[in-house]
Structure formats: C-alpha cells, structure tokens
Image: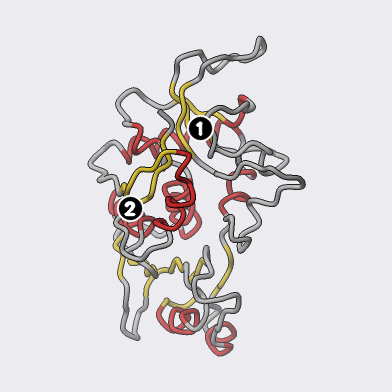
C-alpha cells in the first residue's frame, strides 16, 4: 500500500497515517453513535466509506473514526486474529464469492503459501471447494484467483475450463498480464480484476456486517492464525522491513500498549 502500487493510500497532505486494518478499544463515542459503546473492541475498516478511504489510517495510538468504519469484535475472537480480520480474510471471502464455484469443484490459486492463500484454502474447504496449484489440460478448474499476474496469466488461461473465470487481485509479477487470445476467443475465458476497496464500497452496511460475522465465525472455528512478529509503534520502520522478508511466517503486527 505505502509503496504506491495500489491506490488505497493516496493522502492529499502530510503527515498522513497509513494502515488499512487493525483492532482497537473504544475510549469515547459521540452523542449520535448508536451501535458502538465505550470499552468495546472494534475492527477498524477505513475502506468502508462511500467516499473511499478515510483520512485516518490505523497505524496510530489514537484515532477518530466514523461509526460506519467500526465493527464490534466478538468476545471469543483474540486480538491477534481481529487485527488481521479485514484485508486477507475479506479478500479471500470476496474472491470465493465472485468465483462462485459449486461445492465439489476445483479452483486454482497462485501464491498459495501466502497468508491470504492459506486463509483462502481454509475458507474454500468450509464451502466444500477444493483448491489446487497446478492442473493438467483436460476438464480444467472451475476458476482461478491470481495475485501474480505477468506470465502466470497465460498458464492460468490454459488451466481453467471453458468459460472459466480468473480473478486478478495482485501484481507480484509486474504491471502487465499475459493471456492467451485463443483461450479468450474460442473458450470464452474471463479474466478480470478484484479490488477489495471497490468490493467493500459496493456492499451496504448490513451486507458487509453479515460478511464480517461470517468471517469472524470462520476465523474462530478451527482457523489457525498466521501471526508474525510484533513491534511497538515506535519501531514501525523495523516492522515494515520485516514484513517485506520472504518466509516471515505470518502478518507482522504493530502493537500499542
């Protein structure tokens, strides 16, 4: 996000607070607030605004947020899971929602060893959907979710069934994608993008709350949290460097004590 590859963080002035997810405890509420109470733990979702990203990110000790950007965390969900309950889990949920594969079908995913990839595997399993990394030519997979792009797009277009859907949600392989013209024309393969912010903005409050409740249930029902190292806020630079290392094991967390 802060590298500028994705448009989620584009402040108009500085200093600016980055951060698109996090968990916090409410210390004060406004007079017109109805659904949030002092003392509750909440997940902060800056992207959940009809105007897009709010000015106040989550990498801060204290912040002021709109009621529509806060979602109460169930008591049985620990902070380590709640802090990472938005970006990866809701993306995984949304990708499966858009692919809409029937129970028993296969889908392909790239970067399956990533935190998001492992979450998607567990969410897919709960729907009775099977995930694979490679598929032989033949019937092909029902669809694919791709965070790489680049030349991988060509491989995926050969690997899904006729009229299969490929959702691109990242650009690890660069800013261009290779797709087979033959597959697009003669097999009607669909290759399109998935942008979490747009997916969230297009949902009304109750739809999004329902999704979050389902995500919390999934995360708290046999989900194994993929949590990496924890850093205090004043070591944010070290935390960023750690988050960029391959094989880090899980999401790096910033902690305010």
Question: Label 1: how many residues lie within 10 Å, few (<14), some (14-19) or many (20+)?
Answer: some
Q: Position of residue 69 (x, y in %)?
A: 59, 32
* Figure colour scheme: secondary structure
Which residue is at the front of the view, 60 or 4?
60
Q: In this view, does 204 lie to the left or right of 211?
A: right
Q: In this view, does 149 lie to the left or right of 126?
A: right
Q: Which residue lies furthest to the left in this view?
A: 222
Location of residue 126 in the rendering, given as x and y in whole percent from the top left corner: 29, 48
Gap in angstroms between the C-alphas marked 1 and 2: 26 Å
Taking the spot 60% from the left edge, 49% from the top edge, the residue there is 197
Query: Residue 180: percent from the left, percent from the top?
Result: 54, 87
Report which residue position mark 2 lands on.
Answer: 250
User: Where is mark 1, residue-wise?
Assistant: 209
Q: Residue 36 carries which label?
A: none
Q: Which secondary structure, mark 2? A: loop
150 on left or right of 82: right
Image quarter of the N terminus: bottom right
Above or below residue 213? Residue 200 is: below
Q: Which residue is drawn at 50% across and 41% down?
A: 21
* Camera-side residue of 208 and 235: 235
Percent of width and height locating residue 23:
45, 32
Identify the residue at image location x=54%, y=29%: 70
Residue 248 sits above or below residue 20 on the image = below
Q: Residues within 10 Å of mark 2 (few under 14, many from 20)?
A: some
**Mark 1 secondary-structure assignment:** helix
């Amino acid at each position: 996000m802060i590298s500028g590859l994705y448009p989620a963080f584009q402040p108009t002035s500085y200093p600016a607070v980055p951060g698109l997810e996090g968990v916090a405890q409410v210390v004060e509420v406004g007079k017109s607030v109805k659904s949030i109470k002092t003392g509750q733990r909440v997940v902060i979702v800056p992207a959940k605004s009809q105007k897009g990203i709010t000015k106040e990110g989550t990498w801060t000790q204290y912040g002021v947020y709109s009621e529509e950007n806060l979602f109460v965390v169930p008591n049985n969900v620990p902070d380590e899971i709640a802090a990472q309950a938005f970006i990866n889990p809701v993306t995984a949920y949304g990708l499966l929602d858009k692919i809409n594969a029937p129970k028993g079908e296969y889908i392909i995913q790239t970067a399956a060893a990533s935190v998001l990839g492992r979450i998607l595997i567990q969410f897919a399993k709960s729907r009775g959907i099977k995930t694979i990394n490679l598929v032989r030519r033949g019937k092909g997979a029902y669809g694919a979710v791709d965070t790489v792009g680049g030349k991988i797009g060509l491989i995926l277009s050969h690997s899904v069934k006729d009229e299969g859907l490929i959702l691109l949600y990242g650009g690890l392989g660069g800013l261009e994608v290779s797709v087979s013209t033959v597959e697009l024309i003669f097999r009607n393969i669909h290759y399109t993008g998935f942008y979490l912010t747009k997916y969230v903005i297009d949902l009304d409050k109750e739809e999004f709350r329902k999704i979050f409740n389902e995500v919390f249930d999934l995360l708290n029902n046999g989900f194994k949290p993929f949590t990496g190292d924890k850093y205090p806020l004043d070591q944010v630079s070290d935390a960023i460097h750690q988050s960029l290392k391959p094989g880090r094991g899980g999401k790096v967390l910033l902690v305010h004590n």
